Image (cartoon, rainbow, N blue to C red):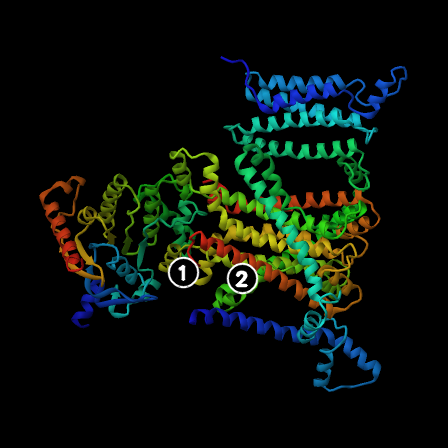
Amino acid sequence: MTVTEATAAASVVQAKGLGLTFRTNDGPVQALTDVNLTIGKGEFVSFIGPSGCGKTTFLRVIADLEKPTEGTISVNGLSPEQAREKRAYGYVFQAAALFPWRTIAKNIALPLEIMGVPDTERKGRIERVMELVNLTGFENKYPWQLSGGMQQRASIARALAFDADLLLMDEPFGALDEIVRDHLNKQLLELWARTNKTICFVTHSIPEAVYLSTRIVVMSPRPGRVTDVIESTLPRERPLDIRESPEFLAIAHRVRDGLHAGHSYED
Amino acid sequence: MNRALENVVPVLTILAGLVVAWYVAAVLLNAPFQRDLDRRAGETPGTMEFIGKTLSQPKPTMPAPHQVAQNFFENTFLRKVTSNRSLVYNAWVTLSSTLLGFAFGTALGILIAVGVVHLTALDRSLMPWIIASQTIPILAIAPMVIVVFAAIGITGLIPKSLISTYLSFFPVAVGMVKGLRSPEIMHLDLMHTYNASSSQVFWKLRVPASVPYLFASMKVAVAASLVGAIVAELPTGAVAGIGAKLLSASYYSQTIDMWSALVAGSIVAALLVTVVGIAGRMVERSMGARPA
Amino acid sequence: MRWFTLSWQAVAAIMLCVLAGFLGPMTQAESDALANPTATFAYPFLNSKSLIFDLILGAAAVSMLRIPRLAAAAALAIGAHVAAWMLLTGIAGFEGTALASYYIILAAAWLLAWRCVTVLSTFKPASRVASVALRLVIPLIFGIWILIIWEAIVRGAGIPFILLPPPSVIGVTIANSIPTLAADVNQTIFKSVVAGYVIGCGCGFLTAILADRVSFLRRGLLPIGNMVSALPIIGVAPIMVMWFGFDWQSKAAVVAIMTFFPMLVNTVAGLAEAGHMERDLMRTYASNYTQTLIKLRLPAAAPFIFNALKINSTLALIGAIVAEFFGTPTVGMGFRISTAVGRMDIDMVWAEIAVAALVGSVFYGLIALAERAATFWHPSVRGG
């Protein structure tokens, strides 16, 4: 085994020279150019940037929902397609995307049914993940009977149900109000600490990115690219009021500078 | 250009497939009778000759496409328009009662919709019946309406177009109610903040919002109207019209005539729906809708 | 505080009563009797006239008092309907003798019924049962009044029953010819319609699935299907009769052709309904075509499929009945209608139409119930 293969195996996501160009009626659009990034096991990486910077596209490339046009990417040492077929990751979308004709428990059972998890095992798993996201007691409710925050928690439970080590989250709390979002951020950190999963998290909120992440990837549009990668110096244990600490504000400041730098020669 | 080709090619392919299937079906369906004829005449034609014969019977079980096309062409373009065998004449008879019925039906439908939207009592009492009446095979009344009107001395255009009216006002009423109710709460609230009168709300908000719904339901209504006119011609021994043509052809087993009448009806239907569609698009564009 | 509330319907009803009283006799017979006081012959409303007036005036007055709305509605309902009942029973046997007062009183009773519906429409009952009951009662009153006015005018104006029989006569005809009607329903509905409907909808559905898998087929079939939906397909009836004979098979064929295209077009549209996000979700699970179809796209298409089933329920009935105009064995609803029209046996035609309406509504109602059960989650059903 060569050295590069060894690092590729230890890292969960590894992108080299990654690029993606969409062909549209108005000509080609460079959604991503030359992205080089390695995400290690157990990291919490946030992607932040204005709309059109390719943060969601990058997540979709990892998930094999888009095919890159340049460069290489590996997920768990495999190609994204192989990783998807091995059900290597759970994906949480901007909206909960729960099926309205299924109860919450049935929604969480959906991936298990598709992946052929035996009936006997399903019940235990559903109970466990519903407890993880604090939804115990809502098993037999339908999605439309729940609040937006609860729906999004159920969709996180659904992504956790099949025990993938990697969690891809695309602005999962973007549509929620700030009070609910704070609450869910805290819960997500607790969940991460308990499960030791690798999380890729797309957001356009600076405080959210700084509060949650071990590493923050700052991106910028036209063409979509990575402009800065910031290592967080915050401890793993983070109460909500850490957001008023000087350390937190310093990181937030760096992120903001990075975002402005990305913009400066554009406008 | 490429886009258009992408859509046209499959349609043409499937149409071509249908024509081929039609020929095959014509040969297969006409073969037993032709075999019978040949046996009686003591002939033993070769395969190709036999197939040729099955496709040129005077009263085939299934006429071949070219027979229908030829008959249609003769009866449309070669006959005098005043001749009662002319398809143009027959189509015109049906079309005139269709259009009259459609005009009345649309007006009636809009009127009912306006009433239903503005009067709660009418909404709660009449609307369920409008919806329930969709479940009733109204066409079954057609022969009786014609006969009853004939008994009191009214014949011709009016009773036929009455059936068309009956069939076409339901879709318009239902579509228009939906359309007049389509403005969002926010827009209605906005009008409320202007202290707009209910007639102002109606003309400035509800009517423009309902236009797409109106034309969508008019397309359904005009097709229903034509069906009504055709069926109305069936039971009465009406002398002219596509329905009368169908019935007399079926009495005398003139299958080719039957098929070409059917083709004529389909062309009229397609034309009517297209005209309504174009009118709708023009109105919507003049109101500033995005061209589709 | 005022102890009454005016309503224009009640006031108008009272004024109409006064007008009718002023005009005098309600029928020609009554007018003859008044002109000839020594003769003693029976005439309509001999004993009931004042009672009818009292009922209408009383109900109108009571409804305007400040009493609970339910009590007002009840008073109006009783006043209007008992008065109407007395008008109808009174005129029976004296058809065609009604004078202006008769119609004025009828109009007054109708106004009370209108007021009753208006009052009922303002109710917002809290309990589910009550609101369902209200949703049924309001249109029921409307329907009853169509029948009342029909009956009253046909009898009052003396329209020959052979042209337009009153509802009561149609009811008697239905009751007297139940075996015939049952045989017709059996032939037309349980043989032609059901067979054709199942075949047509089934084929339409399967073709839609096929078209969904093969995009070439979809792009070709969809414009054709949309166009065919507008064509007078019913015209194929004589051809089908020629091919499949006079019995139910030919009608089933017509029904199958008529129901095929709406099902095809709606199902294809429904299969496109599942959202992008939901499809991406299924893709992240590496779900195969069948799994995505069964777990996501068919449930999402259910409202469209049920819409087609509902449209088709009407089309199927029309198709079967009209196809029978072109030839049947001597049984079937379309056959009965066309022969009854030929013999000017209009009662029987109306009886068949009433039965067809009933069967059509039941058919539609069953599908609507199935729809509510299957698409309970859809905003239009759960009332979101």
Q: Which mark is residue A101?
A: none
Q: Which mark is residue C208?
A: 2
Mark 2 and mark 1 residues within 8 Å of each other at the beta carbon = no
Could you tell me the amino acid type at mark 2?
A: Ala
Quadrant of res C132: top right
Q: Secondary structure at mark 1?
A: loop
Q: Secondary structure at mark 2?
A: helix
Instruction: In the displayed orientation, state which residue is furthest to the right.
Output: C39
Could you tell me the amino acid type at mark 1?
A: Ser
Cα separation, mark 2 vs mark 1, equals 21 Å
Q: Which residue is label 1 attached to?
A: C287
Q: Relative to residue C81, is residue A258 drawn left or right?
A: left
Q: Residues within 10 Å of mark 2 (few under 14, many from 20)?
A: many
Q: Quadrant of the C terminus of chain C?
A: top left
The subunit letter for the residue under badge 1 reads C
- Please check whether the numbered discs 2 and 1 fall on a single chain: yes
User: Which residue is at a point 72% across and 48% down the rendered structure image?
Assistant: B141
Residue C376 in view of the camera: no
Residue B19: x %, y % from top left = 62, 73
Q: Residues within 10 Å of mark 1 (few under 14, many from 20)?
A: many
Of residue C63 and residue A188, the one placed in the foreground of this image is C63
Residue B274: x %, y % from top left = 56, 60
User: Which residue is at a point 88% across and 20% down the rendered structure image?
Assistant: C41
Relative to C227, is C20 above or below? Answer: above
User: Which residue is at a point 89% across and 17% down the rendered structure image?
Assistant: C40
Of residue C267 and residue A4, the one placed in the foreground of this image is C267
Relative to C284, is B176 above or below? Answer: above
Residue B27: x %, y % from top left = 70, 76
Q: Relative to residue B69, is residue A264 drawn left or right?
A: left
Choose the circle earlier in sequence order: 2 or 1: 2
The subunit letter for the residue under badge 2 reads C
